[in-house]
Amino acid sequence: MKKTPTEVKILVSAKKVFYQKGLKGARMQEIADDAGVNKAMLHYYFRSKEKLFDKVFEESVQSVTPVLMNVFLEDSDLNTKIAHLVEMLIDLFMNEPYLSNFIVNELSQNPEKLFLNVLDLEDGLIGKVIPLINQQLQVEIEKGNINSEIRSAELIVNIMSLCLFPIMSQTVLQKTLGIDDERMIRFMNKRKQTVTQFVLDAIKP
Amino acid sequence: MKKTPTEVKILVSAKKVFYQKGLKGARMQEIADDAGVNKAMLHYYFRSKEKLFDKVFEESVQSVTPVLMNVFLEDSDLNTKIAHLVEMLIDLFMNEPYLSNFIVNELSQNPEKLFLNVLDLEDGLIGKVIPLINQQLQVEIEKGNINSEIRSAELIVNIMSLCLFPIMSQTVLQKTLGIDDERMIRFMNKRKQTVTQFVLDAIKP
DNA sequence: TTCAGGTTTAATTAATTGGTCAATAAATAG
DNA sequence: CTATTTATTGACCAATTAATTAAACCTGAA
């Protein structure tokens, strides 16, 4: 079941439109126009708006989790791992500006979609990563390298927060602080260092 | 122009529905049903969906800015101010779970709505707060209490990130980490301390 | 060449949904 | 008590939009 060119064009456009406008805000006609195909093609290949959306959503999640997984599983000390994670997150979500908003939004509006995708408790992101990081933290604590109060879940939440929130509220930030697109990119790139530093400072003993 | 009971009921329900489903996702009928009034009343009092939305949006922004403003302007040292800000943000947005999502979403999809509300560059949140925090930071740096690399904008962004992101992705967090509502509240309450500590640690010299 | 399969199109349908309106009820003023 | 304004209702309209369908169009195999 190789994807036809039309199918691919539709998916690309659907992604673009759904990312920006969400499930309810998106219009099938707009997706068709953007893809340069007849609207009926969307139904021909994907049956319904919801099905098309689900495909896009699934692909969006799958574009993220393996990348994160790799960083978490790489064989490096905690500091480097944190630095890599920060860099990865910022790069990934800066290059796809609406992605973080899209995932967080649609997921908080339709929590049931979570199970089909992210949550593979056995060997998915959560099941594998939390214990691993926990263990790695334990080692560093014993070495006296970091504060013994640090919880892995909390650490990850903090890193995600510091990386994703500014991207999710990019529009607001840019408007309020009056910075253009180019400067925003520089700001976020610089943030790779400052966030890493911020996090490392915060877990020092 | 005192608000009639019906008008209030509509606004309460509109808030509830718009917060959860956004401008496009919300249905006038659903708002009417929730308020227990005839759909025509929504138009009678607010003309159009967009107008009703704008009212809700305006009120939502105005429920936040004064509170933040107070914390920023209070006469206390930086540490206390940070602790208060963190506590305030978490309390405020935990009590209105969809508020942060609502504001960030709708604002990133309709950036033009920003100007009418948040952005009073003369004496609004941004115009007053940034210089003030900057100045306060300068004092602390000279006293040698904090790291001289800290930028006020960045500090605020970090605090906001750490407080708001977990609330915005609450659903996801709860599902992935498998915690119920009650435990989530405890988690976020404990976070008032850990985030404050995290931030303070990170700006130490 | 022809036929069969999938593909594409334009036109149409059906459902949803924001918005209106005329009739009615309730409240208020005179 | 009556007249007038204000509030409320249910039925309806118009526009939008997802979905369907039937016919046309390829394309490659026989």
Image: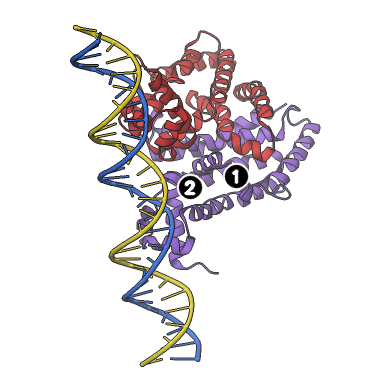
Chain colours: A purple, B red, C yellow, D blue
Report the chain holding disc 1: A
Label 2: which residue?
A95
Seen from the viewer's position, the closer of residues A47 and A10 is A47
1 and 2 marks on the same chain? yes
Residue drawn at the location 50% of the way across and 10% of the way down: B74
- Mark 2 residue crowding within 10 angstroms, few (<14) / some (14–19) / many (20+): few
Identify which amino acid the numbered label 1 is placed on. Answer: Glu
Q: Pick the quarter of the image with the N terminus of chain B.
A: top left
- Residue B198 location, quadrant: top right
Identify which amino acid the numbered label 2 is placed on. Answer: Asn
Residue B82's place in the image compared with A1, above or below, is above
- Percent coordinates x, y for residue C25 in the rendering: 34, 23
Q: Is residue B174 visible?
A: yes
Give the spatial CA distance, label 1 vs label 2: 27 Å
Residue drawn at the location 51% of the way across and 24% of the way down: B156
Element class at badge 1: loop
Seen from the viewer's position, the closer of residues A15 and B129 is A15
- Percent coordinates x, y for residue A186 in the rendering: 45, 39
Report the chain holding disc 2: A
- Residue B89 location, quadrant: top right
Q: Which mark is residue A194?
A: none
Label 1: which residue?
A112
